[in-house]
Image (cartoon, rainbow, N blue to C red):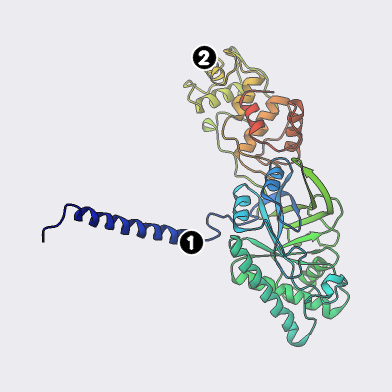
Amino acid sequence: MRPTSRSPRRRVSRMVAVLLTGLSTLVAGLLVAAPADAGNVTTPGNFTGYGFDQCVAPTQSAMDAWLTSSPFWAVGIYISGDSRACTNQPNLSATWVSNQLAKGWRLLPITLGPQASCTTRERYLRQVRISPTPTTSYAKARAQGRAEADKTVAAAKRLGIVPGSTLWYDLEAFTISKTDCRESALSFLSAWTARLHQVGYVSGVYSSAASGIKILDDARVLRPGRYQMPDQVWIADWNQRADVRSSYVRNDGWMPHRRVHQYDGGHNETHGGVRINIDSNWVDLGRGSTIASEPRHCGGAASYNYASYPTRKVGHTGALVKTIQCLLTGKRLYTGKVDGIYDAELGSAVRRYRVSRGLSSLTTVGAAGWVALLSQGDAPLLKYGSASSAVRRLQRALNAADAAGVPVTGVFEGRTTAAVKSYQRGHGLAQTGVVTTTLWNRLFAGRY
């Protein structure tokens, strides 16, 4: 039979339709198969700085406001446990978790399940508690600890909290003098830790310094090996000191970088126009906020780090001139020797750089030139606890702008925060101590 002129087109159309359908199915399958934790980092990782916790995970807009205006960069979130007051978490999802991690937040996922058998809090008395039955070394309590770990891991995975992250068990205050209550609590926490280790998560325990943390520390020292200790502890001791110390815990326990200290209880704080009722914490985990040694500049011929940066011009010599030469070499504006001699060639390179930054066409490097030269680069969000080469650039630029005398360490800490607030005050900005794009742009423009 002779085909009609339309038949080949129909066959091609059918083939295209089949291919498109198959492609759509494949893409849909890949999207469905994408894990909740795709691209997520372990949390909290290496960090020393401020954190807060609040029962209900804040909205995205609240988190964004606090990101750019508060000192906090770690947040406790309740993800599991039948005894938590906030079983309804309207904002908490895998998307929420991945968004916070991508923005640099360190998450502290918390479970509040069965509490000590001798708790006196009325709400917990109406709920399932840790079994105090001593039979077979508190086997029932241990089974509860394992079960709670399994529930928490399942919740963590649904939210995209990856293995290697710390999961925290919240054991509220109780009377530690009652033997079966105390020993069953230790048995529960020991099993919690062992189970988390089996499935690749890090074990953390939050508790009152005078009860749960004290019994863990006593068992660690007085009965070593009897119970498996958590990897990290979160100490509730409201002594108003933002550090890792507590009089209830020996100084060698969970040190260094294995403690969180809740130093202030429930209170309201407002940042970026958003008020949240929080507990305040000092976080020191992983390796803390650290950075590798600074690389050598121009083969070691120049240093970039000084407490202040006086004006330099044609005819000057010395170490600061080498700094200028090296910085402009890196920007491909100077091709001469890094010899510490400010000659006409260097002056010409300085002029070209100043003009490129919108500064006047002088051949001199004064305060504006230094601030622009030393700060130039990317513009990441920085605050207390940041550790990077960008922090070094910030510290140098602040020293050039205000003669702040900030040590150039690459770690954003108290003195850097104070210098940032001073700069913000001088430029009519909100004194948050947080470095945003707005502040970077002023530095890039040589504002001092």
Q: Residue at x 67, y 42 (%)?
A: 411
Can you identify the residue that label 2 sits on?
Answer: 348
Q: Amino acid at mark 2?
A: Ser
Residue 189: horizontal and vertical position, in percent? 73, 72
Residue 423: horizontal and vertical position, in percent? 73, 29
State whether residue 217 is above or below residue 346: below
| In the image, farthest residue toward the left | 1
Q: Residues within 10 Å of mark 2 (few under 14, many from 20)?
A: some
Q: Amino acid at mark 1?
A: Val
| In the image, farthest residue toward the bottom | 135
What label does residue 32 carry, if any? 1
What label does residue 257 carry, if any? none
Q: Quadrant of residue 218?
A: bottom right
* Left or right: 150 as drawn, with respect to 127: left
Residue 278: horizontal and vertical position, in percent? 79, 52
Q: Residues within 10 Å of mark 1 (few under 14, many from 20)?
A: few
Could you say which is closer to the camera, residue 420 or residue 5?
Answer: 5
Residue 393: horizontal and vertical position, in percent? 62, 33
